[in-house]
Image: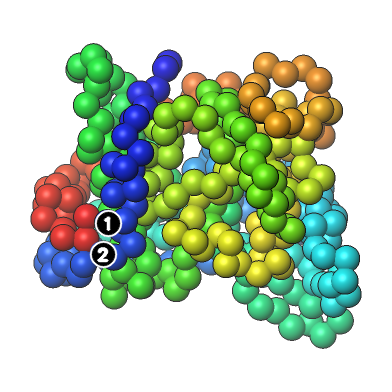
Amino acid sequence: MKQPVDNQRSSLDQTVDKFRHPEPSPLIHRCGLRFTLNRTPIDADYVPAAESRQSTNIINLARDPQTRARNLCALSEQIQVRYHDLLPADASQHPTHHIRLEILSINAAFETSPVVAPFPIAECLGVVFEDRHTGKEFSGPIGLSFSSYIRDYDFNILLPQLLLQQNPPVLDGFGRLHGLLYRLMFRSVWSGGVLEQPCLFALSVSSRSQYQGQAEQHPILGRRYRELGSTSLTSRYFAAMGLSASHFMAPGAMAPLTFYHEADQLLNQTSQDLAALIAVMESLQRIYRPEIYAAHLAAGNHFVPSLNNTDYTPPAVHYDRQERDNQLGPEQAARAWECFLKPHATSLKRLVAEAQCF
């Protein structure tokens, strides 16, 4: 299905700017919105929680008890190798560091509906650096990948309805609720938030877009690419979350990643954090988008990503993309409606309509 796009770049910039300077809203307190945060290490004992989205990349790898340990071990090895490859050659202290991943699960509930169980509003990854010599640990970037049941609902149920209503469809409010709830997860935006630092996400480039290489080079992120044509619907959706898109192909990569971040946040990260972010997400994309990220021919000056590419190295881990798109996505969208959007419809509508920070 062809997705609508917005040719007014200034409109997207204005949307992002709204979220850079949010205003407090007493309504949030009156609605009784409450978040809780759980952290789960991804280690030898990891078992996906029942409420986790089954299509989320790293959770999908761990669904089968028979292959869980093997998949996660193989992924960890790839991450460590890629991480050390990306670091500057003179960073002699870094090889002692080992990357450990954890899942950050944010649950939402309304105190006005105590009989409704908290809902897993979002899940993302967090990096923990472990010094193998001293045993000390310290936190790295959070975000990396992004999991959202409401996004499933928006793209599997709401968007098809909007596309049928008008030609061209009116999508001005698409992603508004999701974007508002996402922003409220951060303590810098709302006192009831549970996340202390901004998220950085790294997704696959779109197979519906074309990209042009730029002269700009970053020592870790690599070569910058520019997306050609109009702003994609995905970028508009992330703009409602207050995030801008940048495209970079790291040294040694086969294709650029799309990074979603706040303002100039991406370029202000340490080399260590950027190397970890790229190492994790490239390793995952080599499994989930091998046609692009395990291709035998690296992206050139003009890059057109294609999932129909046959010249690539198949991943050792099998991933059923048809199951994700045709079964898991719709099932997760239905769960978002039944367990969160429908029972809290009144509170959510009021929140979107009146919250000044949106």
Q: x, y (%) of residue 234? A: 43, 36
Q: Nearer the viewer, residue 198 or 125?
A: 198
Amino acid at dot 1: Lys
Q: What is the quadrant of residue 62 in the picture?
A: top right
| Placement of 259 over or under 2, stated as above or below | below
Residue 22 as seen in the image, left or right of residue 256:
left
Q: Which mark is residue 18?
A: 1
Amino acid at circle 2: Pro
Residue at left offset 38%, top offset 59%: 107
User: Which residue was labeled with disc 2?
Assistant: 22
Give how far across and how far down residue 315 sits, in percent.
79, 32
Residue 90 point in image, percent of width and height:
87, 71
Q: Where 76 falls versus 156 (above or below)?
A: below
Q: Is residue 52 visible?
A: no
Counting from the top left corner in percent of width and height, residue 239 is at 37, 46
Q: Within 10 Å of the Cα at label 1, are there few (<14), some (14-19), or many (20+) other Cα atoms?
A: some
Q: Are marks 2 and 1 in contact (CB under 8 Å)?
A: yes
The residue located at (49%, 55%) in the rendering is 261
Q: Which mark is residue 309?
A: none
Instruction: Residue at 66%, 78% (x, y): give it.
Output: 138
Task: Depth check: give the residue in front, 136 or 273.
Answer: 273
- Specify whether residue 48 is in view: yes
Q: Which quarter shows the N terminus?
A: top left
